[in-house]
Image (cartoon, rainbow, N blue to C red):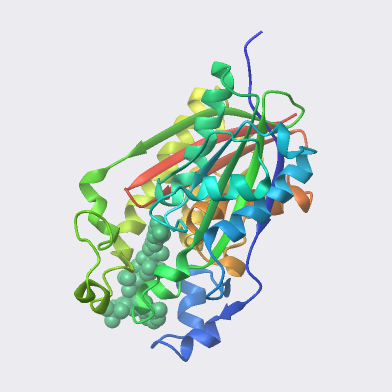
Amino acid sequence: MKRQAFVVGTGHMVPEAILTNADLEKIVDTTDEWITTRTGIKTRHITDASTATSDLALEACRRAMEDAGWAPGDVQAIIMATVTPDHAFPATACLVANRLGLPHVPAWDFEAGCSGFVYGMIQARAFIEAGLFDRILVVGAECLTKITNWKDRASCVLFGDGAGAAAVSSQGPGGLLGGFHWGSDGAISDLLVQQAGGSRMPATRETVDAGLHCIAMNGSETFKHAVRAMRDSCMLALEMDGTPKESVDLLISHQANYRIIDATARALDLPPEKVFVNIDKYGNTSAASIPIALDEARRSGVVKPPMTVVLAAFGAGLTWAGMIVKWS
Ligand code: ACO
């Protein structure tokens, strides 16, 4: 019988401290009204100086493992999507694996911007179907506020910190990982970039002074590509799955901007009650946004069998991805 991959547990973690739109009004020239109407964001959770991405990821993984009923010895690999690792190297996944007490399993980071979690789920599906592993942790974790330019009102209002994880198993019951589509376009990589700190522009006093280690984004251009990429990857994922869009029960999309989520929902002819939205609370947490939303949707009973869920993402790269997950 063909091997299949199922989501059997989820967990998330956000830091306690909350930054409101009113707080941002004191930092940059903005208003609660502008942020709310242009993005849908009201608050975001932010880490303190002593908290790093691995701290959030660790707790999200613990919660996903508990939800799945897994002991540390059950986990055979851990894959982490992040653009804000604790260090350039070693991989943050290795640090998390050690703190979870996993038994020397393969652990690695990869980067696909905000599409990272769905990219990770596609990898998990492939590894499980190929028979390499039976139980994998897929994590999306970020501390975006550590690389936010607090002088740039067009971007600093958007980002928050958090982590989400999924336990993926060859044994159900759970959410069956189905059809997917993923892609990228490096020709427009300059729309969303952290200029300095890599081999192209190593860190110097000047790069730090110029704020080149922070997120730089062309918001309106990114917006246009995001709407097209999310719509197309959802449609292609549905096609691969052999599922008509009329059968979709819930859209869980990357939480970057409410208007982007709404445009994707309209492309799928989905009414608001079939769209999960928590951007108002968390802002854009990049690779963490979909697993945080998935966990909240499961724990609050919004996701319940039988249900066909579409995951949709886009982000720096640019990258995009869609995946169908079926709870039966
Ligand atoms: N408060 C008040 N005014 C603002 C703010 C602000 N915080 N930010 C921008 N403005 C102003 C601009 O200066 C501009 O003023 P002007 O017309 O006088 O020049 C006006 O608002 C409109 O600016 P736009 O950039 O055209 O606004 P837009 O409607 O496109 O919204 C936003 C901006 C929210 C950034 C939107 O473009 C967006 O969400 N883009 C996608 C972002 C995204 O999803 N990024 C990818 C993921 S991030 C990652 O991968 C790490």
- The quarter of the picture where residue 78 lies is top right
- Can residue 274 be seen in this snapshot? no
Task: Residue at 26% x, 70% y: name it.
Answer: 212
- Can residue 224 be seen in this snapshot? yes
Residue 323 falls left or right of residue 30? right
Task: Residue at 56% x, 56% y: name it.
Answer: 54
Seen in the picture, residue 186 relative to 46 is either above or below; the reply is: above
* Image coords of residue 39 (percent x, y): 48, 69
Q: Nearer the viewer, residue 54 or 240?
A: 54
Taking the image as four quarters, which one is ligand 1 found in? bottom left
* Image coords of residue 185 (percent x, y): 27, 42
Image quadrant in which the N terminus is located: top right
Q: Nearer the viewer, residue 203 or 301?
A: 203
Going by the picture, which residue comes out furthest to the top? 1
Image quadrant in which the C terminus is located: top right
Going by the picture, which residue comes out furthest to the bottom? 26
- The quarter of the picture where residue 77 lies is top right
* Image coords of residue 62 (percent x, y): 71, 49
Task: Residue at 53% x, 82% y: name it.
Answer: 21
* Image coords of residue 180 (percent x, y): 49, 30
Seen in the picture, residue 199 relative to 9 is either above or below; the reply is: below
- The quarter of the picture where residue 65 lies is top right
Task: Residue at 46% x, 34% y: name it.
Answer: 235
Q: How many marks?
A: 0
Q: Nearer the viewer, residue 314 or 143?
A: 143
Seen in the picture, residue 221 relative to 298 is either above or below; the reply is: below
Seen in the picture, residue 104 relative to 47 is either above or below; the reply is: above
Q: Nearer the viewer, residue 215 or 242?
A: 215
Residue 314 falls left or right of residue 128? left
